[in-house]
Amino acid sequence: MPEEATSSTFASERLHINKGAEETVRELLRSLLESGKVDAVLALGRTGNGSGGVAYSLFRDPAAFEADGDAVPLLPFMPANAGGLLSRLTLEGALDEPVAAMIRPCELRAFVELVKLSQGSLDNVLLISSTCGGVYPLDADIDGRLEEKLPEYWEGVARGELSDDARPTCRACQHFVPEGADITVALLGEADLDTECTLQLNTERGATFASEVEGTPISEKPKSEAIDRSQSEREAFREELFAGVGVGLKDLIHTFGRCIGCHGCKTVCPICYCHLCYFDSQNCERPTGYYEGELVRKGGLRVPSDTVYFQLGRMAHMAVSCVGCGMCTDVCPADIPVSTLFSKVGAAAQAVFDYEPGRDVAEEIPLRTFEEEEFAQVAT
Amino acid sequence: MEEQEFQPAIVGFLCNWCTYAAADSAGVSRFKMPPSVMVVRVMCSGRVDPLFVLTAFFLGADGVLISGCWPGQCHYQVGNLQARRRTALLKSIFDTLGLELEDRLRLSWISSSEAPRFVRVVKAFDRQITDLGPSPIRDELFL
Protein backbone atom coordinates (compact mmCIF):
# COMPACT_ATOMS: atom_id res chain seq x y z
CA MET A 1 0.00 0.00 0.00
CA PRO A 2 1.42 3.39 -0.86
CA GLU A 3 2.24 5.52 2.11
CA GLU A 4 0.34 8.47 0.77
CA ALA A 5 -2.87 6.44 0.74
CA THR A 6 -4.31 8.69 3.41
CA SER A 7 -3.61 11.84 1.43
CA SER A 8 -6.32 14.43 1.66
CA THR A 9 -6.55 14.93 -2.09
CA PHE A 10 -8.94 11.97 -2.34
CA ALA A 11 -12.58 13.08 -2.52
CA SER A 12 -14.53 10.90 -0.13
CA GLU A 13 -17.25 8.68 -1.58
CA ARG A 14 -20.45 7.52 0.04
CA LEU A 15 -22.05 4.15 -0.55
CA HIS A 16 -25.65 3.37 0.31
CA ILE A 17 -26.29 -0.27 1.14
CA ASN A 18 -29.65 -1.99 1.43
CA LYS A 19 -28.70 -3.97 4.50
CA GLY A 20 -28.51 -3.20 8.17
CA ALA A 21 -25.34 -1.75 9.66
CA GLU A 22 -24.40 -4.90 11.54
CA GLU A 23 -24.84 -7.05 8.44
CA THR A 24 -22.97 -4.56 6.27
CA VAL A 25 -19.97 -4.49 8.59
CA ARG A 26 -19.89 -8.26 8.93
CA GLU A 27 -20.11 -8.66 5.17
CA LEU A 28 -17.42 -6.06 4.54
CA LEU A 29 -14.99 -7.72 6.96
CA ARG A 30 -15.82 -11.17 5.65
CA SER A 31 -15.30 -10.11 2.04
CA LEU A 32 -11.94 -8.56 2.92
CA LEU A 33 -10.80 -11.91 4.29
CA GLU A 34 -12.37 -14.01 1.56
CA SER A 35 -10.84 -11.96 -1.25
CA GLY A 36 -7.46 -12.14 0.46
CA LYS A 37 -7.21 -8.34 0.53
CA VAL A 38 -6.37 -8.49 4.21
CA ASP A 39 -4.48 -11.13 6.10
CA ALA A 40 -6.50 -10.72 9.27
CA VAL A 41 -9.15 -8.56 10.89
CA LEU A 42 -8.81 -7.06 14.35
CA ALA A 43 -12.25 -6.91 15.90
CA LEU A 44 -14.06 -7.69 19.10
CA GLY A 45 -14.90 -11.32 19.65
CA ARG A 46 -16.91 -13.31 22.15
CA THR A 47 -14.56 -15.79 23.71
CA GLY A 48 -15.54 -19.25 24.90
CA ASN A 49 -18.09 -20.14 22.19
CA GLY A 50 -20.07 -17.01 22.67
CA SER A 51 -20.70 -17.42 26.36
CA GLY A 52 -17.54 -15.94 27.82
CA GLY A 53 -16.02 -12.51 27.90
CA VAL A 54 -15.33 -10.06 25.12
CA ALA A 55 -11.83 -9.41 23.85
CA TYR A 56 -10.18 -7.90 20.83
CA SER A 57 -8.99 -10.70 18.59
CA LEU A 58 -7.30 -11.17 15.26
CA PHE A 59 -9.53 -13.18 12.96
CA ARG A 60 -8.44 -14.92 9.80
CA ASP A 61 -11.39 -17.26 9.26
CA PRO A 62 -14.14 -15.42 7.35
CA ALA A 63 -16.71 -17.61 9.12
CA ALA A 64 -16.12 -15.60 12.29
CA PHE A 65 -18.09 -12.79 10.66
CA GLU A 66 -21.16 -14.87 9.83
CA ALA A 67 -24.20 -13.73 11.79
CA ASP A 68 -23.57 -16.43 14.41
CA GLY A 69 -19.76 -16.22 14.28
CA ASP A 70 -17.41 -15.40 17.14
CA ALA A 71 -16.78 -11.85 16.02
CA VAL A 72 -18.94 -9.07 17.44
CA PRO A 73 -17.51 -6.08 15.54
CA LEU A 74 -20.08 -3.50 16.62
CA LEU A 75 -20.54 -4.54 20.25
CA PRO A 76 -20.56 -1.34 22.37
CA PHE A 77 -17.77 -2.49 24.61
CA MET A 78 -14.08 -1.64 25.01
CA PRO A 79 -12.08 -4.29 26.87
CA ALA A 80 -8.87 -2.52 25.84
CA ASN A 81 -8.07 0.55 23.80
CA ALA A 82 -7.37 -0.98 20.38
CA GLY A 83 -5.01 1.88 19.59
CA GLY A 84 -2.58 0.37 22.07
CA LEU A 85 -3.14 -3.09 20.61
CA LEU A 86 -2.42 -1.89 17.06
CA SER A 87 0.74 -0.27 18.38
CA ARG A 88 1.78 -3.60 19.81
CA LEU A 89 1.22 -5.27 16.42
CA THR A 90 3.21 -2.67 14.49
CA LEU A 91 5.82 -1.65 17.07
CA GLU A 92 8.72 -3.10 15.13
CA GLY A 93 7.58 -1.78 11.76
CA ALA A 94 4.74 -2.02 9.31
CA LEU A 95 2.92 -5.33 9.03
CA ASP A 96 3.95 -7.48 6.06
CA GLU A 97 0.34 -8.12 5.08
CA PRO A 98 -2.60 -5.74 5.39
CA VAL A 99 -4.77 -6.06 8.47
CA ALA A 100 -8.18 -4.43 8.83
CA ALA A 101 -9.13 -3.02 12.22
CA MET A 102 -12.70 -2.26 13.29
CA ILE A 103 -12.19 0.32 16.02
CA ARG A 104 -13.79 3.34 17.69
CA PRO A 105 -12.76 6.96 17.08
CA CYS A 106 -10.88 7.30 20.39
CA GLU A 107 -8.96 4.11 19.66
CA LEU A 108 -8.06 5.43 16.24
CA ARG A 109 -6.88 8.71 17.75
CA ALA A 110 -4.80 6.85 20.34
CA PHE A 111 -3.18 4.83 17.56
CA VAL A 112 -2.33 8.00 15.64
CA GLU A 113 -0.74 9.47 18.78
CA LEU A 114 1.29 6.30 19.28
CA VAL A 115 2.45 6.37 15.67
CA LYS A 116 3.63 9.95 16.26
CA LEU A 117 5.52 8.66 19.29
CA SER A 118 7.24 6.07 17.06
CA GLN A 119 5.27 3.27 18.67
CA GLY A 120 3.59 1.89 15.58
CA SER A 121 2.94 2.23 11.90
CA LEU A 122 -0.20 3.14 9.98
CA ASP A 123 1.04 1.32 6.88
CA ASN A 124 -0.85 -1.82 6.02
CA VAL A 125 -3.52 -1.15 8.63
CA LEU A 126 -6.93 -0.53 7.13
CA LEU A 127 -8.77 1.59 9.67
CA ILE A 128 -12.53 1.11 9.79
CA SER A 129 -14.44 3.15 12.30
CA SER A 130 -17.92 4.49 12.93
CA THR A 131 -19.78 7.50 14.23
CA CYS A 132 -19.72 6.36 17.80
CA GLY A 133 -22.63 5.91 20.17
CA GLY A 134 -20.37 5.13 23.10
CA VAL A 135 -19.62 1.94 24.96
CA TYR A 136 -20.76 0.39 28.21
CA PRO A 137 -18.45 0.14 31.20
CA LEU A 138 -16.61 -3.13 31.68
CA ASP A 139 -18.80 -4.26 34.58
CA ALA A 140 -21.87 -4.13 32.30
CA ASP A 141 -20.84 -7.43 30.74
CA ILE A 142 -20.47 -9.55 33.86
CA ASP A 143 -22.20 -12.88 33.16
CA GLY A 144 -22.94 -11.76 29.60
CA ARG A 145 -25.50 -9.20 30.79
CA LEU A 146 -24.49 -6.81 28.04
CA GLU A 147 -26.68 -8.70 25.55
CA GLU A 148 -29.80 -7.56 27.44
CA LYS A 149 -28.88 -3.93 26.95
CA LEU A 150 -28.26 -4.13 23.21
CA PRO A 151 -31.80 -3.54 21.90
CA GLU A 152 -32.09 -0.37 23.97
CA TYR A 153 -28.58 0.68 22.89
CA TRP A 154 -29.29 0.40 19.18
CA GLU A 155 -32.66 2.14 19.47
CA GLY A 156 -30.82 5.00 21.16
CA VAL A 157 -28.10 5.11 18.51
CA ALA A 158 -30.75 5.21 15.75
CA ARG A 159 -32.25 8.28 17.45
CA GLY A 160 -28.78 9.75 17.95
CA GLU A 161 -28.90 9.37 21.71
CA LEU A 162 -26.55 7.75 24.16
CA SER A 163 -27.67 5.42 26.91
CA ASP A 164 -27.47 6.81 30.44
CA ASP A 165 -25.59 3.64 31.32
CA ALA A 166 -22.82 4.29 28.79
CA ARG A 167 -19.39 5.25 30.05
CA PRO A 168 -19.58 8.80 31.41
CA THR A 169 -16.53 9.56 29.28
CA CYS A 170 -18.47 8.55 26.16
CA ARG A 171 -21.41 10.72 27.14
CA ALA A 172 -18.97 13.63 27.40
CA CYS A 173 -16.99 12.79 24.25
CA GLN A 174 -16.33 15.57 21.74
CA HIS A 175 -14.67 13.46 19.06
CA PHE A 176 -17.14 10.71 18.25
CA VAL A 177 -16.90 11.25 14.48
CA PRO A 178 -13.72 9.48 13.40
CA GLU A 179 -11.03 11.49 11.71
CA GLY A 180 -8.49 9.67 9.62
CA ALA A 181 -10.45 6.44 9.19
CA ASP A 182 -10.23 4.80 5.78
CA ILE A 183 -13.85 3.71 6.02
CA THR A 184 -16.51 5.22 8.28
CA VAL A 185 -19.72 3.39 9.06
CA ALA A 186 -22.55 5.82 9.75
CA LEU A 187 -24.33 4.70 12.92
CA LEU A 188 -25.30 7.62 15.11
CA GLY A 189 -28.67 9.11 14.21
CA GLU A 190 -29.28 6.66 11.34
CA ALA A 191 -32.96 5.93 11.87
CA ASP A 192 -33.04 2.82 9.67
CA LEU A 193 -29.80 1.19 10.71
CA ASP A 194 -31.58 -2.18 10.93
CA THR A 195 -32.32 -2.16 7.22
CA GLU A 196 -29.88 0.19 5.51
CA CYS A 197 -26.43 1.55 5.97
CA THR A 198 -24.09 4.20 4.61
CA LEU A 199 -20.38 3.62 4.26
CA GLN A 200 -18.16 6.62 3.79
CA LEU A 201 -14.94 5.84 1.97
CA ASN A 202 -12.57 8.55 3.08
CA THR A 203 -9.36 7.45 1.42
CA GLU A 204 -8.22 5.79 -1.74
CA ARG A 205 -7.11 2.88 0.39
CA GLY A 206 -10.62 2.61 1.84
CA ALA A 207 -12.21 2.76 -1.62
CA THR A 208 -9.88 0.09 -2.98
CA PHE A 209 -10.48 -2.28 -0.12
CA ALA A 210 -14.25 -1.80 -0.16
CA SER A 211 -14.54 -2.26 -3.92
CA GLU A 212 -16.35 -5.57 -3.49
CA VAL A 213 -19.11 -4.12 -1.35
CA GLU A 214 -22.32 -3.82 -3.33
CA GLY A 215 -23.88 -0.46 -2.86
CA THR A 216 -25.13 2.62 -4.63
CA PRO A 217 -22.85 5.62 -4.68
CA ILE A 218 -24.71 8.63 -3.30
CA SER A 219 -23.74 12.24 -3.41
CA GLU A 220 -25.95 13.62 -0.65
CA LYS A 221 -24.13 15.12 2.26
CA PRO A 222 -23.89 13.21 5.52
CA LYS A 223 -26.78 13.93 7.85
CA SER A 224 -25.35 16.24 10.44
CA GLU A 225 -28.44 17.11 12.45
CA ALA A 226 -28.21 14.14 14.81
CA ILE A 227 -24.43 14.54 15.02
CA ASP A 228 -24.77 18.23 15.90
CA ARG A 229 -27.43 17.50 18.50
CA SER A 230 -25.30 14.77 20.05
CA GLN A 231 -22.33 17.10 20.05
CA SER A 232 -24.15 19.76 22.05
CA GLU A 233 -25.72 17.20 24.39
CA ARG A 234 -22.33 15.69 25.08
CA GLU A 235 -20.78 19.10 25.50
CA ALA A 236 -23.34 19.95 28.16
CA PHE A 237 -22.71 16.66 29.93
CA ARG A 238 -18.99 17.24 29.74
CA GLU A 239 -19.32 20.57 31.48
CA GLU A 240 -21.40 18.89 34.16
CA LEU A 241 -18.76 16.19 34.54
CA PHE A 242 -15.91 18.69 34.67
CA ALA A 243 -17.73 20.78 37.25
CA GLY A 244 -18.22 17.63 39.33
CA VAL A 245 -14.53 17.10 39.99
CA GLY A 246 -13.26 19.63 42.45
CA VAL A 247 -9.92 21.28 41.91
CA GLY A 248 -7.53 22.71 44.41
CA LEU A 249 -5.22 20.78 46.65
CA LYS A 250 -7.86 19.82 49.21
CA ASP A 251 -10.26 18.45 46.59
CA LEU A 252 -7.49 16.60 44.80
CA ILE A 253 -6.44 14.94 48.03
CA HIS A 254 -10.08 14.10 48.62
CA THR A 255 -10.47 12.60 45.13
CA PHE A 256 -7.30 10.53 45.32
CA GLY A 257 -7.80 9.72 48.99
CA ARG A 258 -9.39 6.47 47.81
CA CYS A 259 -6.49 5.57 45.51
CA ILE A 260 -5.02 2.17 46.33
CA GLY A 261 -1.96 2.79 44.15
CA CYS A 262 -2.56 -0.16 41.81
CA HIS A 263 -1.45 1.80 38.69
CA GLY A 264 -4.21 0.10 36.71
CA CYS A 265 -5.07 3.43 35.06
CA LYS A 266 -1.56 3.59 33.66
CA THR A 267 -1.63 -0.04 32.55
CA VAL A 268 -4.75 0.41 30.41
CA CYS A 269 -3.84 3.87 29.15
CA PRO A 270 -2.99 3.61 25.43
CA ILE A 271 -0.79 6.70 25.57
CA CYS A 272 1.29 5.48 28.55
CA TYR A 273 3.52 3.34 26.37
CA CYS A 274 6.74 3.22 28.42
CA HIS A 275 7.91 -0.33 29.00
CA LEU A 276 9.05 0.63 32.47
CA CYS A 277 7.12 3.44 34.06
CA TYR A 278 9.16 5.74 36.28
CA PHE A 279 6.59 5.19 39.02
CA ASP A 280 7.08 1.41 38.85
CA SER A 281 10.85 1.74 38.73
CA GLN A 282 13.35 1.45 41.53
CA ASN A 283 13.35 5.24 41.79
CA CYS A 284 9.92 5.03 43.36
CA GLU A 285 10.58 2.05 45.57
CA ARG A 286 10.96 4.05 48.71
CA PRO A 287 13.63 2.78 51.06
CA THR A 288 12.69 2.58 54.75
CA GLY A 289 14.76 5.67 55.40
CA TYR A 290 12.46 7.69 53.14
CA TYR A 291 9.49 7.17 55.45
CA GLU A 292 11.56 8.07 58.48
CA GLY A 293 12.87 11.16 56.69
CA GLU A 294 9.38 12.31 55.75
CA LEU A 295 8.20 11.69 59.31
CA VAL A 296 10.90 14.01 60.56
CA ARG A 297 10.34 16.55 57.78
CA LYS A 298 6.57 16.90 57.88
CA GLY A 299 5.46 14.80 60.80
CA GLY A 300 3.49 12.16 58.93
CA LEU A 301 2.87 10.57 55.58
CA ARG A 302 0.19 8.75 53.65
CA VAL A 303 0.93 5.09 52.95
CA PRO A 304 0.91 4.08 50.15
CA SER A 305 2.38 7.45 49.28
CA ASP A 306 2.81 9.20 45.93
CA THR A 307 -0.78 8.83 44.71
CA VAL A 308 -1.21 12.45 43.61
CA TYR A 309 2.45 12.62 42.57
CA PHE A 310 1.88 9.64 40.28
CA GLN A 311 -1.13 11.20 38.58
CA LEU A 312 0.56 14.58 38.21
CA GLY A 313 3.62 12.91 36.73
CA ARG A 314 1.45 11.03 34.28
CA MET A 315 -0.36 14.24 33.36
CA ALA A 316 2.93 16.05 32.75
CA HIS A 317 4.02 13.25 30.45
CA MET A 318 0.92 12.47 28.44
CA ALA A 319 -2.00 14.82 29.09
CA VAL A 320 -1.40 16.64 25.78
CA SER A 321 -1.94 13.33 24.00
CA CYS A 322 -4.87 12.14 26.16
CA VAL A 323 -7.62 11.02 23.78
CA GLY A 324 -10.20 10.72 26.54
CA CYS A 325 -11.12 7.09 25.91
CA GLY A 326 -12.12 6.51 29.52
CA MET A 327 -10.28 3.23 30.05
CA CYS A 328 -8.65 4.56 33.24
CA THR A 329 -11.91 5.47 34.95
CA ASP A 330 -13.43 2.20 33.84
CA VAL A 331 -10.76 0.00 35.42
CA CYS A 332 -10.33 2.05 38.61
CA PRO A 333 -11.20 -0.23 41.54
CA ALA A 334 -11.75 2.81 43.75
CA ASP A 335 -14.11 4.57 41.30
CA ILE A 336 -11.90 7.63 40.96
CA PRO A 337 -12.92 9.75 37.93
CA VAL A 338 -9.39 9.60 36.53
CA SER A 339 -10.49 10.13 32.95
CA THR A 340 -12.51 13.24 33.80
CA LEU A 341 -9.49 14.81 35.45
CA PHE A 342 -7.23 13.87 32.58
CA SER A 343 -9.73 15.19 30.02
CA LYS A 344 -10.04 18.43 31.94
CA VAL A 345 -6.29 18.92 32.34
CA GLY A 346 -5.70 17.60 28.82
CA ALA A 347 -8.19 19.99 27.23
CA ALA A 348 -6.51 22.98 28.89
CA ALA A 349 -3.01 21.80 28.00
CA GLN A 350 -4.02 21.01 24.43
CA ALA A 351 -5.51 24.50 24.13
CA VAL A 352 -2.18 25.99 25.23
CA PHE A 353 -0.53 24.41 22.20
CA ASP A 354 -3.56 24.57 19.90
CA TYR A 355 -3.28 20.81 19.60
CA GLU A 356 -5.81 18.05 19.18
CA PRO A 357 -4.53 14.53 19.76
CA GLY A 358 -5.12 12.13 16.90
CA ARG A 359 -6.33 14.81 14.49
CA ASP A 360 -3.53 14.44 11.99
CA VAL A 361 -0.56 12.11 11.96
CA ALA A 362 1.56 14.86 10.37
CA GLU A 363 0.99 17.17 13.34
CA GLU A 364 3.89 16.97 15.82
CA ILE A 365 3.23 16.30 19.48
CA PRO A 366 3.68 19.68 21.21
CA LEU A 367 6.50 18.55 23.48
CA ARG A 368 8.52 17.24 20.56
CA THR A 369 8.58 20.54 18.76
CA PHE A 370 8.72 24.29 19.42
CA GLU A 371 8.57 27.68 17.77
CA GLU A 372 11.42 30.15 17.97
CA GLU A 373 9.08 32.88 19.13
CA GLU A 374 6.39 31.77 21.55
CA PHE A 375 5.37 31.82 25.21
CA ALA A 376 7.35 34.99 25.79
CA GLN A 377 5.53 35.45 29.10
CA VAL A 378 6.68 32.02 30.35
CA ALA A 379 10.39 32.88 30.45
CA THR A 380 11.05 35.87 32.68
CA MET B 1 7.71 33.91 65.82
CA GLU B 2 7.21 36.50 63.12
CA GLU B 3 6.27 35.65 59.54
CA GLN B 4 9.63 37.04 58.36
CA GLU B 5 11.37 34.01 59.84
CA PHE B 6 10.22 32.04 56.80
CA GLN B 7 13.20 31.09 54.68
CA PRO B 8 12.04 29.69 51.35
CA ALA B 9 13.54 26.54 49.93
CA ILE B 10 14.04 26.99 46.19
CA VAL B 11 15.41 24.26 43.95
CA GLY B 12 17.35 25.72 41.05
CA PHE B 13 17.95 23.61 37.96
CA LEU B 14 20.81 25.52 36.36
CA CYS B 15 22.25 24.87 32.93
CA ASN B 16 25.90 23.86 33.02
CA TRP B 17 26.81 26.15 30.10
CA CYS B 18 25.33 29.41 31.26
CA THR B 19 23.49 29.96 34.53
CA TYR B 20 25.64 27.56 36.51
CA ALA B 21 28.68 29.54 35.42
CA ALA B 22 26.87 32.79 36.20
CA ALA B 23 26.03 31.51 39.69
CA ASP B 24 29.66 30.48 40.16
CA SER B 25 30.81 33.88 38.99
CA ALA B 26 28.34 35.59 41.34
CA GLY B 27 29.85 33.63 44.21
CA VAL B 28 33.43 34.38 43.22
CA SER B 29 32.50 38.06 42.93
CA ARG B 30 31.02 37.88 46.45
CA PHE B 31 27.69 39.33 45.38
CA LYS B 32 25.19 39.24 48.22
CA MET B 33 22.05 37.21 47.65
CA PRO B 34 19.58 35.15 49.66
CA PRO B 35 20.83 31.64 50.48
CA SER B 36 17.54 30.07 49.42
CA VAL B 37 18.50 28.43 46.11
CA MET B 38 19.66 24.84 46.24
CA VAL B 39 21.46 24.29 42.97
CA VAL B 40 21.07 21.20 40.82
CA ARG B 41 23.42 21.39 37.88
CA VAL B 42 21.95 20.01 34.67
CA MET B 43 23.63 19.84 31.28
CA CYS B 44 20.81 21.83 29.68
CA SER B 45 17.52 23.38 30.77
CA GLY B 46 16.07 20.93 28.25
CA ARG B 47 17.21 18.10 30.50
CA VAL B 48 14.66 19.12 33.12
CA ASP B 49 11.91 16.55 32.92
CA PRO B 50 8.61 17.94 34.27
CA LEU B 51 8.93 15.13 36.82
CA PHE B 52 12.01 16.82 38.31
CA VAL B 53 9.90 19.89 39.03
CA LEU B 54 7.09 17.84 40.54
CA THR B 55 9.55 15.83 42.61
CA ALA B 56 11.07 19.03 43.98
CA PHE B 57 7.65 20.33 44.99
CA PHE B 58 6.59 17.04 46.54
CA LEU B 59 9.80 16.84 48.54
CA GLY B 60 9.10 20.22 50.05
CA ALA B 61 10.41 22.92 47.71
CA ASP B 62 8.64 26.27 48.01
CA GLY B 63 9.79 27.31 44.58
CA VAL B 64 11.53 25.87 41.52
CA LEU B 65 13.79 27.89 39.27
CA ILE B 66 14.80 26.55 35.88
CA SER B 67 17.43 28.64 34.21
CA GLY B 68 19.09 28.23 30.85
CA CYS B 69 20.68 30.00 27.94
CA TRP B 70 18.99 32.77 26.00
CA PRO B 71 17.10 31.60 22.89
CA GLY B 72 19.59 31.09 20.10
CA GLN B 73 22.46 30.47 22.51
CA CYS B 74 21.68 26.94 23.68
CA HIS B 75 24.72 24.69 23.71
CA TYR B 76 22.53 22.01 22.18
CA GLN B 77 20.72 24.41 19.81
CA VAL B 78 17.15 24.12 21.09
CA GLY B 79 17.05 22.52 24.56
CA ASN B 80 15.99 25.80 26.13
CA LEU B 81 13.06 26.15 23.72
CA GLN B 82 11.86 22.70 24.73
CA ALA B 83 12.21 23.69 28.37
CA ARG B 84 9.98 26.67 27.66
CA ARG B 85 7.23 24.42 26.27
CA ARG B 86 7.47 22.09 29.26
CA THR B 87 7.24 25.01 31.63
CA ALA B 88 4.16 26.29 29.80
CA LEU B 89 2.65 22.80 30.11
CA LEU B 90 3.38 22.51 33.83
CA LYS B 91 1.91 25.93 34.52
CA SER B 92 -1.21 24.94 32.61
CA ILE B 93 -1.56 21.73 34.65
CA PHE B 94 -1.02 23.57 37.94
CA ASP B 95 -3.56 26.18 36.92
CA THR B 96 -6.24 23.69 35.82
CA LEU B 97 -5.88 21.66 39.00
CA GLY B 98 -5.88 24.75 41.19
CA LEU B 99 -2.63 23.74 42.85
CA GLU B 100 -1.43 27.34 43.21
CA LEU B 101 2.03 26.31 42.12
CA GLU B 102 2.21 28.24 38.83
CA ASP B 103 3.73 31.31 40.50
CA ARG B 104 6.23 29.13 42.31
CA LEU B 105 7.79 27.91 39.07
CA ARG B 106 10.05 30.27 37.20
CA LEU B 107 11.97 29.89 33.96
CA SER B 108 14.71 32.44 33.27
CA TRP B 109 17.34 33.01 30.62
CA ILE B 110 20.69 33.92 32.17
CA SER B 111 23.91 33.72 30.19
CA SER B 112 27.27 32.83 31.75
CA SER B 113 28.35 36.49 31.71
CA GLU B 114 25.26 37.68 33.56
CA ALA B 115 26.20 37.10 37.21
CA PRO B 116 24.46 40.34 38.28
CA ARG B 117 21.32 39.23 36.46
CA PHE B 118 21.48 35.88 38.25
CA VAL B 119 21.59 37.75 41.56
CA ARG B 120 18.64 39.92 40.52
CA VAL B 121 16.57 36.91 39.47
CA VAL B 122 17.33 35.04 42.70
CA LYS B 123 16.51 38.09 44.82
CA ALA B 124 13.25 38.73 43.01
CA PHE B 125 12.19 35.09 43.07
CA ASP B 126 13.14 34.74 46.74
CA ARG B 127 11.04 37.84 47.49
CA GLN B 128 8.12 36.45 45.50
CA ILE B 129 8.23 33.07 47.25
CA THR B 130 8.68 34.68 50.66
CA ASP B 131 5.55 36.76 50.00
CA LEU B 132 3.64 33.66 48.90
CA GLY B 133 4.72 31.81 52.03
CA PRO B 134 5.41 28.11 52.40
CA SER B 135 4.22 25.90 49.55
CA PRO B 136 0.77 24.46 50.24
CA ILE B 137 1.97 20.96 49.46
CA ARG B 138 5.15 21.19 51.51
CA ASP B 139 3.73 19.81 54.71
CA GLU B 140 0.69 18.06 53.31
CA LEU B 141 0.62 14.52 54.66
CA PHE B 142 -1.91 12.96 52.32
CA LEU B 143 -0.20 13.24 48.96
Image (tube, coloured by chain):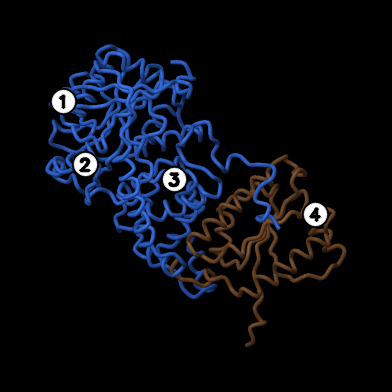
Chain colours: A blue, B brown
Q: Which residue is mark 1?
A: A69
Left or right: B133 in relation to A41: right
Q: Amino acid at mark 4?
A: Ala
Residue at far right of view = B29
Above/below status of A220 relative to A224: above
Viewer-closest of B101 and A309: B101
Q: Quadrant of residue A68?
A: top left
Marked residue chain, label 2 = A
Q: Which residue is mark 3?
A: A322
Cα distance, mark 4 to mark 2?
67 Å
Marked residue chain, label 4 = B
Residue at far front of view = A220
Above/below status of A275 relative to B58: above
Asked if both marks, 3 and 4, belong to the same chain, the answer given is: no
Q: Which residue is mark 4?
A: B21
Q: Residues within 10 Å of mark 1 (few under 14, many from 20)?
A: some
Q: Amino acid at mark 1?
A: Gly
Q: Quadrant of residue A255?
A: bottom left
